[in-house]
Amino acid sequence: MDYLKELEGKSVHDCYHHHQQQQIKMSKMASPIFVPGPVIVGAGPSGLAAAACLIQKGIIPSLILERAQCLASMWQFKTYDRLRLHLPKQFCQLPLMPFPKNLPSYPTKQQFLAYLKAYADHFDIKPVFSQTVVSAEFDHVCQLWRVKTRGVIKKEDTAEYVCQWLIVATGECAEEVVPQIEGMGEFEGQIVHTSKYKSGSMFCGKNVLVVGCGNSGMEVCLDLCNHNARPSLVVRDTVHILPQQMLGKSTFGLSMFLLKWFPIRFVDQFLLLMSHLMLGDTAQFGLRRPKLGPLELKNLYGKTPVLDVGTLTQIKNGKIKVCRGIKRLARNAVEFVDGKVENFDAMVLATGYKSNVPSWLKGSDMFSEKDGFPRKPFPNGWKGENGLYAVGFTKRGLLGASIDAKRIAEDIEHSWKAEAKHVLEFPRPLA
């Protein structure tokens, strides 16, 4: 794309001085920095996937801004030690580069991080780290996005970037969700969110209450059991628990195959029948199932079923207690909504994460102020107006992020080529 060099010094947008350099260095600057390609906010798997797809389309000069000091900081610093991918690797690989064949079907956290580093190296993706995006807003006068950043280490290091395309890749898990429970300030035991939980070794011999019965909460309970703690699990609502494997295949892979041939409700009935045969009636252990099937519930509301990795066996054995919702906390006790009171030494909040997009993206209706997700549901939530895109907000994990990344790259490619044609046809002065 040699035509981009012609943009320097030529006033295509009168209100900005276009500045372009091969490697952008952060400094105290008032002048905006023009980025000829898209600006991508977030260097997690979604941001890397978007960058790689753009590179594959020949759209090379994009810029990734990342508030942390490394790739995939969520995976690096906010996940527990025993974590593995919950789905087989073929459903979690990023576009254009599969996992190494020698990796297990369910790679470990460290194996996944090594894959992401190799992915960035392969496509020569080099984000600008330690830069928090404080605001991004579309300038209707100049028809460009204005993205303002502040240094994480040096607060005085600020910058403003201007670009034609903005890709939001901060993800569904940008900030922890910490519920406000009555008496929380009085509880004398340790309270940690799963983002700070690494291993059950620190809770050996203790009574631990885990709040939240999603995949993380279930796996933390199992980890606590393995480290000789005494976990209890708060289950406020209904939950679907499915075996991780069925008929020698991953439950997710089998579901995807069946959905090609049968309606979703038929596949749900099959999954529930197999789950009952393999796991038994989970309701007798305090784990009531929703009225909607697991796939239909996921499709309509984004609620992910739990894939059992051994937790249910420990619940059946009585090593993990199931409790109702919490009413209030006391100094070293918890009162539940059914009136029971039990003593606990610690609490682990497996209460999930939320998007932070509304805190910095201004003047756009693409994202909901309520939950920070695109207002349009999957598969239509990836594209907004004025060159705004979203990757990784599908509630469908890494597979959904890959789908978004491909669509975004294809869409930008069309306008990229159209602009290239326009610039090449621009009348040149006679020598």
Image: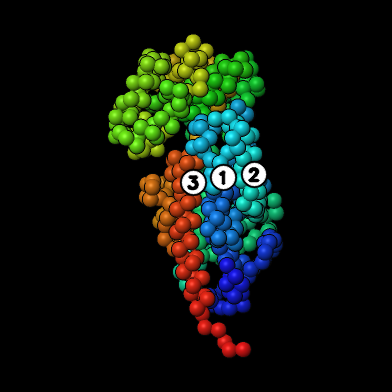
The three-letter code of the residue at mark 2 reads: Ala
Q: Is residue 18 above or below residue 99?
A: below
Return the residue nearer the eye: 134 or 295.
295
Q: Which residue is mark 1?
A: 97
Return the residue nearer the eye: 230 or 199.
199
Q: Quadrant of the N terminus?
A: bottom right
Mark identifier at residue 118: 2
Q: Residue drawn 47% across and 18% down?
A: 312
Q: Is residue 320 visible?
A: yes
Please provide percent x and percent y for residue 195: 58, 34
- CA gap, disc 2 and disc 1: 10 Å
Q: Is residue 297 visible?
A: no
Does the residue at mark 3 contact the one at mark 2 (Cβ under 8 Å)? no
Please provide percent x and percent y for residue 340: 44, 15
- CA gap, disc 1 and disc 3: 11 Å
Indicate the secondary structure of the residue bearing disc 2.
helix
- CA gap, disc 3 and disc 2: 17 Å
Mark identifier at residue 41: none
Q: Earlier in the sequence, mark 2 or mark 1?
A: 1
In the visual, does 421 lie left or right of 280?
right
Please provide percent x and percent y for residue 21: 66, 66
Q: Is residue 197 above or below residue 274?
A: below
Q: Residue drawn 32% across and 35% down?
A: 261
Mark identifier at residue 402: 3
Return the residue nearer the eye: 158 or 388.
388
Depth-wise, is mark 1 or mark 3 nearer the camera?
Answer: 1
